[in-house]
Amino acid sequence: MKKRIIAVIMTLCMSTFVYGCSQTTEESAVQNKTINVLAAASLTDVMHELELDYEADHPGIDLVFSFAGSGALQTQIEEGAPADIFISAASKQMDALNEEGLMDSASIRDLLLNSVVLIVPADSELGLDSFEDVVNDDVFVIALGEPESVPAGKYAQQVFESLGIWDEVQARTNFGTDVRTVLTWVEMGEVDCGVVYATDAYTSDMVTIAAQAPEGSCDRVVYPAGIVAGSGVSEESEDFLTYLESPEAAAVFESYGFTMAG
């Protein structure tokens, strides 16, 4: 009899424990919210650091990042991929989505500024020190982002067009799907040189900046950010965007070579 009573008590205790755990898990699931952030590939390193800082202060928020060329991210949003925030490396992609009604217009703001540079492998002996030098006889392969989908590639095209050498450059170019692909090719010595953002070059000790794009040779490199229309976490997304404009986030951005646009 005693054994039966003890068994009943233990069963009740276990039931209470399981229910308590289940209730805690359900409450946690209700409290935790995911913000899907689609961001230009050049933001990969800095955003991972900001993610850790933000989530540490906002335990109920889970930031999920997808990094790629801005054109590819635009297509993902157009095709209905999960997205709450879009941060582009150029206005073109943001403007297109906004015109299609896929962005919350009131949320869009210019977040960051960057610059365009010519890079070479750290052990390069070509002696390049200007964008014009990429058409020297000893330069065989240049790496650029695809101009139609990668803003860094479009900026590079503008620079070379302003110098009157775009046709020559095209004939020697391998086009990458994003700026980090270009960086990797240069790091590995698979190409003689490439064009990336200054912030990408700063992340690697395997490349050297050979030259800055001549002043006025390309559009201003602006990173707009905004909330995707129909986001189910628009308030939380706005809070994260506000954080990205804060002095704390600005210090992190600037440590990676970005300049705040505001």
Image (cartoon, rainbow, N blue to C red):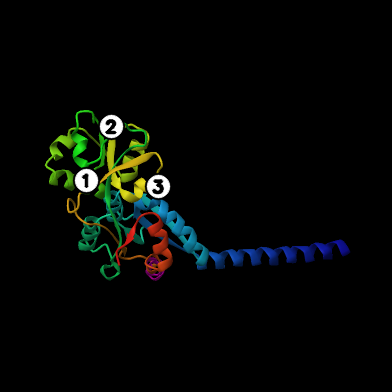
Point out the residue furthest to the right here.
2
Residue at image point 74% right, 66% down: 13
Which residue bears the numbered disc 2? Answer: 126
In magenta, the rendered stretch is 234-241
Say which residue appears at 30% left-offset and 69% top-offset: 107
Q: Quadrant of residue 21?
A: bottom right
Where disc 1 sits, the SS reads helix
Where residue 244 appears, x then y in whole percent? 39, 64
Please tell me whether residue 26 is drawn above or below residue 154 in the rendered image.
below
Nearer to the camera, 37 or 91: 91
Q: Which residue occupies the foreground of this view, 99 or 205?
A: 205
Q: Which residue is mark 1?
A: 156
- Residue 34 picture quarter: bottom left
Nearer the observer, disc 1 or disc 2?
2
Which residue corresponds to the image point at 58% horizontal and 63% vertical from the top-left? 25
Residue 137's spot in the image, x, y percent?
19, 28
Left or right: 27 as drawn, with respect to 152: right
